[in-house]
Amino acid sequence: MPGRAAILERQLGLLNQGLALLSRQNSFYRRKLAGIALPLSSLSDYRRLPFTTKSELIDDQSANPPYGTNLTYDAGAYTRIHSTSGTTGRRLKVLDTEESWAWFTRCWEEIYRVFGVGPGDRVFAAFGFGPFVGFWAGFEAAHRIGAQAIPGGALSSLQRLDAILDCRATVLLSTPTYALRLAEVARENGIDIAGSAVRATIHAGEPGASIPATRSLIESAWGARAWDHAGLSEAGAWGYECPAGEGMHALESEFIAEVLEIGGDSPVGEDQPGELVLTNLGRWAAPVVRYRTGDLVRLRSTPCACGSAFLRFPGGVLGRADEMVQVRGVNVYPSAVESIVREESGISEFQIEIFARRRMWEMRAEIEVGEGSKPEEVKARLEKKLHLRLGLRAEVALVPVGSLPRFELKARRFRIQREGSQNEM
Ligand SMILES: [Zn+2]
């Protein structure tokens, strides 16, 4: 495995090749890179490059419809188009050429290799195959590594379960939430998925598979090893779970990853949470350079037990950077809350609201408690645990089973309402 110096040297080489191309052919980045001396002589020069934000890319597409100016080639060269799953209506269109899509797929091939997926595997994608990039590249990479790729779009959950059993799928691709949803439907219908051929589940689209309690629910329901993977429409498939269980590794052979202070531009220290900032090093047709992902991660750069020198993020993606609040000096973020909720195995779905009231953070949770558990006891235990472990007053409300939304992609279970200077509390 390459050491740190070799990784950084490769990054600088790829970056300089890409920046040279952008400064000639990509009008979005030609504007942004104006005045910067190329090639960069070291990666410390890299930190002088301007950031790219999602709203900047969306504004550019609005001002220059339909695809904006972050294009390195003529429009006719782009053979793929996806769009982000924005709920606001301001969706970002992301374009790829054959070459840049092949790079995206190669990142997934690398991830499959780490997870031990290959020839002989049958990979079922429980995914809608809509405009969101989701598992499109994972699906394509499956057949490229010699596995069989089974599309699971446009099917009900029950039909998906039937197909998984019928095709003897060995690998499931889905969000963590949806793996649990399928398990719930299997239980309701007396289907034995723990005894199915599925031996590994690969998750993306939202944090969850790195949360110990969520992971163990998935693993015991499916009788399989659950793997976490992280990707982003705008950047690509950037992360994979460490096989030694040390967190999410950034795929630094294909990306430059930094962790910066939330809302700032200084690097965070070891083990500190911050915002992940990425440059992709092979998608030059429509790249992102120093892209502020909005994803919250905790940085660890010490040598890893798995032998990889790539940076890693314990606990994976912890949530969105703007979803972190500080309660008496303790960082509270969605995955910390989810890990506590999921420890109560009787809870089948939940929603969390964190809000400021009279300069104090409080939390309200709505939970569904399935059959076989005593709702009032679960409620009382959860209130106590949330208060004890997070240090904030928590009110838990029981709601009827099936009343909370179920998600196939991008579960939205957290809402944070700030008032005034609550961040300092
Ligand atoms: Zn590792």
Image (cartoon, rainbow, N blue to C red):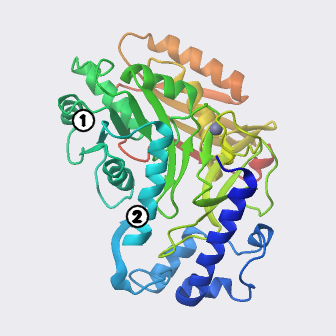
Q: Amino acid at mark 2?
A: Ala
Q: Which residue is mark 2?
A: 102
Q: Position of residue 69 (x, y in %)?
A: 49, 84
Circles 2 and 1: CB atoms closer than 8 Å: no
Figure quadrant of residue 399 = top left
Number of on-image labels? 2
Report whether 177 appears left or right of 127: right
Say which mark, if any, is on residue 157.
Answer: 1
Q: Amino acid at mark 1?
A: Ser
Residue 90 visible in the picture: no
Q: In the picture, which quadrant includes the C terminus?
A: top right
Position of residue 318 relative to residue 244, above or below, is below
Q: Position of residue 326 (x, y in %)?
A: 75, 42
Q: Residue shown at 60%/60% (left/top)?
A: 255
Task: Check disc 1 and report its element: helix, strand or loop.
Answer: helix
Task: Check disc 2 and report its element: helix, strand or loop.
Answer: helix
Q: Residue shown at 74%/77% (left/top)?
A: 40
Q: Quarter of the picture for ligand 1?
A: top right
Q: Position of residue 189 (x, y in %)?
A: 21, 21
Residue 237 visible in the picture: yes
